[in-house]
Amino acid sequence: MTLEIAALILAWIVILALSLTVLALARQVGILHQRIAPAGALLARAGPERGTAAPVVQVTALDGSVFEVGRQTGSVELILFVSPGCPLCKALLPILPGFADREKLAITLASDDSIEPLEAMAARFGLDRTRFVNSPELGRAWAVDKLPHAVLLDETGRVVARGLVNSREHLESMTLAHESGHGSIQSWFRSKAA
Protein backbone atom coordinates (compact mmCIF):
# COMPACT_ATOMS: atom_id res chain seq x y z
CA MET A 1 0.00 0.00 0.00
CA THR A 2 2.81 2.43 0.82
CA LEU A 3 4.41 1.67 -2.53
CA GLU A 4 1.19 2.66 -4.32
CA ILE A 5 0.97 5.93 -2.37
CA ALA A 6 4.60 6.74 -3.19
CA ALA A 7 3.94 6.05 -6.91
CA LEU A 8 0.86 8.26 -6.81
CA ILE A 9 2.77 11.11 -5.13
CA LEU A 10 5.58 10.74 -7.65
CA ALA A 11 3.08 10.84 -10.55
CA TRP A 12 1.56 14.07 -9.20
CA ILE A 13 5.02 15.61 -8.82
CA VAL A 14 5.79 14.74 -12.47
CA ILE A 15 2.43 16.17 -13.61
CA LEU A 16 3.08 19.38 -11.67
CA ALA A 17 6.60 19.68 -13.12
CA LEU A 18 5.29 19.14 -16.66
CA SER A 19 2.57 21.74 -16.10
CA LEU A 20 5.12 24.30 -14.94
CA THR A 21 7.29 23.50 -17.98
CA VAL A 22 4.36 24.05 -20.36
CA LEU A 23 3.55 27.39 -18.70
CA ALA A 24 7.19 28.49 -18.96
CA LEU A 25 7.30 27.54 -22.65
CA ALA A 26 4.03 29.38 -23.32
CA ARG A 27 5.50 32.49 -21.71
CA GLN A 28 8.62 32.22 -23.88
CA VAL A 29 6.49 31.90 -27.03
CA GLY A 30 4.66 35.09 -26.02
CA ILE A 31 7.95 36.93 -25.49
CA LEU A 32 9.25 35.77 -28.87
CA HIS A 33 6.02 36.84 -30.53
CA GLN A 34 6.46 40.35 -29.15
CA ARG A 35 10.12 40.56 -30.22
CA ILE A 36 9.62 39.32 -33.78
CA ALA A 37 7.75 41.96 -35.75
CA PRO A 38 5.51 40.88 -38.60
CA ALA A 39 7.36 41.14 -41.89
CA GLY A 40 5.96 43.49 -44.46
CA ALA A 41 6.82 43.92 -48.11
CA LEU A 42 10.59 43.69 -48.45
CA LEU A 43 11.88 47.13 -49.30
CA ALA A 44 13.65 47.62 -52.60
CA ARG A 45 16.78 49.75 -52.61
CA ALA A 46 16.42 51.28 -56.07
CA GLY A 47 13.50 53.00 -57.76
CA PRO A 48 11.17 55.90 -56.99
CA GLU A 49 10.99 56.80 -53.31
CA ARG A 50 7.92 56.98 -51.11
CA GLY A 51 6.07 60.27 -51.45
CA THR A 52 7.44 61.07 -54.91
CA ALA A 53 5.36 61.23 -58.05
CA ALA A 54 5.27 57.91 -59.86
CA PRO A 55 6.95 57.75 -63.25
CA VAL A 56 4.27 57.90 -65.93
CA VAL A 57 4.77 55.18 -68.54
CA GLN A 58 2.56 54.55 -71.55
CA VAL A 59 1.80 50.82 -71.84
CA THR A 60 -0.17 48.45 -74.03
CA ALA A 61 -2.45 45.91 -72.38
CA LEU A 62 -2.87 42.32 -73.57
CA ASP A 63 -6.19 43.29 -75.15
CA GLY A 64 -4.43 45.98 -77.25
CA SER A 65 -5.68 49.02 -75.32
CA VAL A 66 -3.16 51.76 -74.52
CA PHE A 67 -3.09 53.67 -71.23
CA GLU A 68 -0.66 55.34 -68.83
CA VAL A 69 0.50 53.77 -65.59
CA GLY A 70 1.48 56.17 -62.81
CA ARG A 71 -0.74 59.08 -63.63
CA GLN A 72 -3.28 60.53 -61.22
CA THR A 73 -6.39 58.34 -61.40
CA GLY A 74 -8.40 59.27 -58.33
CA SER A 75 -8.14 55.75 -56.93
CA VAL A 76 -5.47 53.76 -55.12
CA GLU A 77 -3.58 51.56 -57.59
CA LEU A 78 -1.49 48.45 -57.05
CA ILE A 79 1.03 47.63 -59.76
CA LEU A 80 2.16 44.02 -59.45
CA PHE A 81 5.12 42.85 -61.51
CA VAL A 82 4.82 39.13 -62.27
CA SER A 83 6.13 36.44 -64.61
CA PRO A 84 4.64 33.17 -65.89
CA GLY A 85 7.77 31.37 -64.65
CA CYS A 86 7.58 32.73 -61.09
CA PRO A 87 6.03 30.24 -58.59
CA LEU A 88 5.41 32.96 -55.97
CA CYS A 89 3.61 35.05 -58.58
CA LYS A 90 1.35 32.11 -59.39
CA ALA A 91 0.56 31.73 -55.68
CA LEU A 92 -0.45 35.41 -55.37
CA LEU A 93 -2.60 35.68 -58.50
CA PRO A 94 -5.64 33.72 -57.22
CA ILE A 95 -6.00 36.03 -54.20
CA LEU A 96 -5.77 39.30 -56.15
CA PRO A 97 -9.44 39.75 -57.13
CA GLY A 98 -10.72 39.34 -53.56
CA PHE A 99 -7.88 41.45 -52.19
CA ALA A 100 -8.57 44.24 -54.70
CA ASP A 101 -12.29 44.22 -53.93
CA ARG A 102 -11.76 44.27 -50.17
CA GLU A 103 -9.12 47.03 -50.27
CA LYS A 104 -10.86 48.96 -53.10
CA LEU A 105 -7.76 48.91 -55.32
CA ALA A 106 -7.28 49.19 -59.05
CA ILE A 107 -4.77 46.51 -60.05
CA THR A 108 -2.35 46.59 -62.95
CA LEU A 109 -0.31 43.47 -63.66
CA ALA A 110 2.98 44.01 -65.47
CA SER A 111 5.52 41.72 -67.06
CA ASP A 112 8.21 41.77 -69.72
CA ASP A 113 7.76 38.19 -70.91
CA SER A 114 6.63 37.33 -74.42
CA ILE A 115 2.92 37.64 -75.22
CA GLU A 116 2.06 33.91 -75.53
CA PRO A 117 2.99 32.93 -71.94
CA LEU A 118 1.26 36.06 -70.61
CA GLU A 119 -1.91 35.22 -72.56
CA ALA A 120 -1.80 31.69 -71.12
CA MET A 121 -1.29 33.07 -67.61
CA ALA A 122 -4.20 35.50 -68.01
CA ALA A 123 -6.46 32.69 -69.23
CA ARG A 124 -5.37 30.26 -66.51
CA PHE A 125 -6.01 32.68 -63.65
CA GLY A 126 -8.93 34.60 -65.19
CA LEU A 127 -7.00 37.88 -65.14
CA ASP A 128 -8.31 41.16 -66.53
CA ARG A 129 -6.54 41.52 -69.89
CA THR A 130 -7.35 45.24 -70.00
CA ARG A 131 -5.01 45.85 -67.01
CA PHE A 132 -2.33 43.23 -67.79
CA VAL A 133 0.56 44.89 -69.59
CA ASN A 134 3.68 43.70 -71.32
CA SER A 135 6.17 46.51 -70.76
CA PRO A 136 9.91 46.25 -70.10
CA GLU A 137 9.93 50.07 -69.85
CA LEU A 138 7.61 49.97 -66.84
CA GLY A 139 9.89 47.51 -65.05
CA ARG A 140 12.93 49.69 -65.77
CA ALA A 141 11.12 52.82 -64.53
CA TRP A 142 10.53 51.07 -61.19
CA ALA A 143 13.97 49.36 -61.05
CA VAL A 144 12.32 45.95 -60.68
CA ASP A 145 14.95 43.26 -60.37
CA LYS A 146 13.13 40.50 -58.45
CA LEU A 147 9.59 39.14 -58.58
CA PRO A 148 6.89 39.45 -57.42
CA HIS A 149 7.38 43.17 -56.94
CA ALA A 150 4.52 45.48 -55.97
CA VAL A 151 4.03 49.24 -56.01
CA LEU A 152 1.15 51.03 -54.31
CA LEU A 153 0.16 54.46 -55.65
CA ASP A 154 -2.27 56.83 -53.96
CA GLU A 155 -5.10 58.70 -55.65
CA THR A 156 -2.75 61.46 -56.80
CA GLY A 157 -0.19 59.12 -58.41
CA ARG A 158 2.35 59.35 -55.60
CA VAL A 159 4.30 56.34 -54.34
CA VAL A 160 2.87 55.03 -51.08
CA ALA A 161 4.82 51.78 -50.73
CA ARG A 162 6.81 49.36 -52.85
CA GLY A 163 8.87 46.21 -52.55
CA LEU A 164 8.97 42.45 -52.90
CA VAL A 165 5.75 40.69 -51.93
CA ASN A 166 5.85 36.97 -51.29
CA SER A 167 2.48 36.51 -49.59
CA ARG A 168 -0.93 37.98 -48.91
CA GLU A 169 0.47 39.43 -45.68
CA HIS A 170 3.08 41.36 -47.66
CA LEU A 171 0.34 42.80 -49.90
CA GLU A 172 -1.71 43.71 -46.84
CA SER A 173 1.33 45.40 -45.29
CA MET A 174 1.37 47.79 -48.25
CA THR A 175 -2.23 48.83 -47.70
CA LEU A 176 -1.53 49.15 -43.97
CA ALA A 177 1.42 51.38 -44.83
CA HIS A 178 -0.96 53.56 -46.84
CA GLU A 179 -3.52 53.72 -44.03
CA SER A 180 -0.90 54.46 -41.37
CA GLY A 181 1.01 57.04 -43.41
CA HIS A 182 4.25 55.06 -43.20
CA GLY A 183 6.12 53.74 -46.23
CA SER A 184 6.48 50.30 -44.72
CA ILE A 185 5.59 48.25 -41.70
CA GLN A 186 9.28 48.36 -40.75
CA SER A 187 9.25 52.18 -40.59
CA TRP A 188 6.06 52.05 -38.52
CA PHE A 189 7.79 49.76 -35.99
CA ARG A 190 10.84 52.06 -35.92
CA SER A 191 8.60 55.04 -35.16
CA LYS A 192 6.92 53.14 -32.32
CA ALA A 193 10.29 52.12 -30.85
CA ALA A 194 11.56 55.71 -30.84
Image: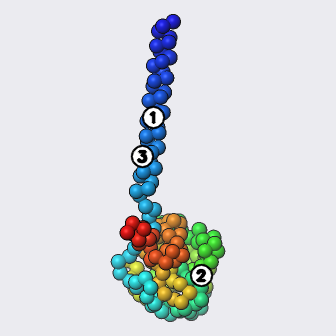
The front one of 82 and 156 is 156
Query: Which residue sits furthest top?
Result: 1
Query: Which image quarter is the C terminus in?
Result: bottom left
Could you tell me which residue is drawn at 50 percent across and 17 percent down? 8
Image location (x, y in percent) of residue 60 = 54, 90
Amino acid at the residue labelled 3: Gln
Characterize the local packing of mark 3: few (<14), some (14-19) or many (20 or more) Cα atoms within 10 angstroms. few
Q: Which mark is residue 28?
A: 3
Left or right, 85 with respect to 131, comes to left
Could you tell me which residue is drawn at 59 percent across and 79 percent down? 105
- Structural distance between the alpha carbons of marks 2 and 1: 52 Å
Observer able to see residue 123: no
Give the foreground label among 2 and 1: 1
- Structural distance between the alpha carbons of marks 3 and 2: 42 Å
| Mark 3 or mark 2: whose residue is earlier in sequence | 3
Q: Which of the 4 image quadrants contains residue 126? A: bottom right
**Secondary structure of residue under mark 3:** helix
List the residue tagged with mark 1: 20
